[in-house]
Image (cartoon, rainbow, N blue to C red):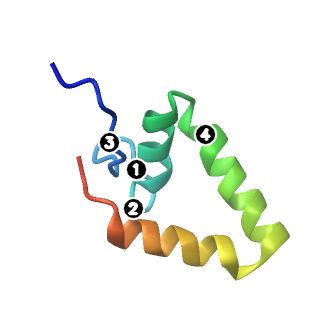
């Protein structure tokens, strides 16, 4: 029995690349909260969060 959690991109609950839904599944919270935090982060920090999202979309494997 392997109880370790792995971060993966969601295939079923995706808007763009599934990063926010995968992160929400990993943290056991609602994906809408993560999506709102990403949008808020883009407005507050500029392109830093958008670049982080792009990197996560490339590096994180799909479910």
Which image quadrant for residue 61? bottom left
Q: Does residue 29 appear left or right of residue 21 in this picture?
A: right
For the residue carrying disc 2, how many other residues have a C-alpha within 10 Å: few (<14), some (14-19), or many (20+)?
Answer: some
| Image quarter (top left, top right, bottom left or bottom right) of the N terminus | top left
Q: Which residue, given by chain and number where applicable, does mark 1 sit on?
A: 14
Left or right: residue 62 compared with residue 9 = left
Disc 3 to disc 1: CB gap under 8 Å: no
State the residue in front, 15 or 5: 5
Q: Secondary structure at mark 3?
A: loop
In the image, residue 2 sits, relative to residue 6, either above or below, namely above
Q: Residue at x 40, y 54 (%)?
A: 18
Return the mark for residue 17: 2
User: Secondary structure beneath disc 4?
Assistant: helix
**N-terminal-most mark, 3 or 2:** 3
How far apart are labels 3 and 1 at the CA level?
A: 17 Å
Provide the secondary structure element on which disc 1 rests.
loop
Secondary structure state at the residue bearing disc 2: loop
The residue labelled by disc 4 is 32
For marks 4 and 2, the one nearer the N-term is 2
Q: Position of residue 8 (x, y in %)?
A: 32, 49
Q: Nearer the viewer, mark 4 or mark 3?
A: 3
The mark found on residue 6 in the picture is 3
The CA span between labels 4 and 2 is: 14 Å
Q: CA distance from mark 1 to mark 4?
A: 11 Å
Residue 51 placement (x, y as % from top left): 57, 78
Q: CA distance from mark 4 to mark 3?
A: 20 Å
């Amino acid at each position: 029995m392997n109880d370790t959690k792995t971060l993966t991109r969601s295939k079923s609950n995706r808007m763009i690349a599934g990063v926010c839904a995968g992160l929400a599944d990993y943290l056991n919270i609602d994906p809408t909260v993560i999506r709102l935090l990403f949008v808020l982060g883009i407005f507050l920090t500029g392109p830093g969060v958008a670049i982080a999202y792009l990197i996560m979309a490339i590096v994180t494997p799909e479910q």
